[in-house]
Amino acid sequence: MAGDPRLPGGIDRISGLTDDLLGHILSFMPVWEAVRLSALSRRWRGAWAHAPVLNISDKQHPDRFLDFAGAALARYGQPDIPSLAVTIGRRSSLGPATAAWLRGAMEHVVGSIRVQVDRHTPPLDQLVLPRSLRATAMALDLSGDVLSKGVLVLPEPAEPAPFRRMTELSLSSVRLQVQPDRLGEFLSSCFPQLRKLRLRKVCNVAAEPRLWPLMLDMDMLELEVDSIHQLTVLQVVAAKLRLLIVRHCFESLAVLRADIVFKVFAPGLEVISWTGWFPKQLNFLPDAQCLLETCCGADRLDLCVDIYDGWVPSMVSKQDFMERMPHLPNIRTLSLTIVAILRMLRSPIGEIVFCFLRRCPNLTLLHIDLSTLHQFTRQDPRYLVFPEDDAETKAAKPCQDREYDPRKAHKYQLRLGSLRKIRISGFAGTDAEMELADLLFGIGAERSALEGISISSFAQLKGRIGRIAQKMRARFPLVGGRWEISSLEESTWTKNNDGLERSNALRSTTIM
């Protein structure tokens, strides 16, 4: 390519790169593409064999994947593989021979291991984990079929802490072949340096279809447990744990009405994310606190609230639900994401928001995200449906629960004297959303410190923002400020400067 007139100045600058840079570029390509590319220049020949990531896919070699993968591994330019990434998308590549080759290849890796079975592909044949590994990170996704999982056999350790170098482990769509009560013991004893653990759609071969416990005693920093429905016990002892994510676990127990044990000892916990079924007892040892009580010392709280089908306002107003909310006086910033199928059901949005606001009396900033309300399914928020006009919205909404009158709610008992800014996103102007606005800054809502309100809708509803702004001006005049439509297609209310000056002067007088 040197002196090629088609290049500016006739100079081949790519071939002048160092071996490390060439290898880094080629590591982003599957091996077969990197080999073909090396034919373009003598300088590139064999550069793929020094790439920091050996990227192997069966896309171009469906019938002789093992031959190609074996040859690539044999011709790699060094005995240790920095990182290995294997992608399998064809049924013909999923047999026991592939699993055996994978096991052998993993033993050469000193960096990261990633095995991905593509979407709509059956599970990989039984994969036996090596008795020890030198890798520092491993991510195994053994099935692309949502209804099946690949079998992963956990070996008897050949030595103490055989995976001592590994700091990150992710298992997805996996059936573990291990005694139900020994998974936690295996992870805790074999992975002493593990800092990030992710278990998604994991079940236990020996326990199916029965329930099984998961007890972890590790120095992890991050733990994610996602879509493990067979858990009856989740117990975590991790003094350094900072991030805990629990998604869609325990659902089968809700149907079976089985007792759930959830215990966490994590004094350093900073972030909690919980999605899905919410058991009554969540014990954060040693004080047996509930989930939200662990946030009492925080000044910011971000929550996603999923309103289940069948909820009506009277359910939310019941005393037991209200009293289970802990008092959170230190929270200054509150962000709530509300998930529901609004068009199909009368969702008690205002009542649920009220439950959180009454427990956070010293708020200064409030954000409520309604963008996942207008959808047909919780599985994909892209399936949105929008009201065409107010008449259609009223016609589509079922009758409200007669036991609860939002006009006689506890709005007038809600005092948020420190609240300065309110932001609502994903606002479409439905009746339920207007009731929420009425709760936040309607007539009777005392908001002496309020300085600004921002209300944004969807990109698909740009033409509706003007009508939303008109409705806001008419229903919420808010003396002392003005409503406008910003350049960002938002309806905003801003307190007048003279009002701010009078407020500041009043504060100064009070302090003096």
Image: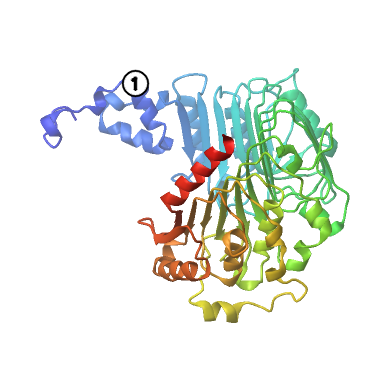
Left or right, 163 with respect to 178, comes to left
Instruction: Find residue 315 and report its horizontal and vertical position in percent.
Output: 78, 65
Task: Kindly indicate the quadrant of the structure image that contains residue 489.
Answer: bottom left
Q: Is residue 235 above or below residue 390?
A: above
Q: Nearer the viewer, residue 510 or 485?
A: 510
Task: Kindly indicate the quadrant of the structure image that contains residue 309.
Answer: bottom right
Q: Can you say which quadrant of the picture contains the N terminus?
A: top left
Task: Kindly indicate the quadrant of the structure image that contains residue 380.
Answer: bottom right
Q: Is residue 325 above or below residue 176?
A: below
| Element under disc 1 | helix
* Dot 1 amino acid type: Asp
Q: Is residue 283 above or below residue 378?
A: above
Left or right, 457 with respect to 403, comes to left
Left or right, 197 with respect to 229, comes to left
Instruction: Find residue 181 and report its horizontal and vertical position in percent.
Output: 85, 36
Residue carrying label 1: 19
Instruction: Find residue 164 and report its horizontal and vertical position in percent.
Output: 67, 20
Instruction: Find residue 350 and report its horizontal and vertical position in percent.
Output: 65, 62
Q: Is residue 392 above or below residue 159?
A: below
Q: Nearer the viewer, residue 59 or 243?
A: 243
Q: Nearer the viewer, residue 479 or 346?
A: 479
Mark 1: give few (<14), some (14-19) or many (20+) Cα within 10 Å: some
Residue in the image at 41% along x and 31% along y? 27
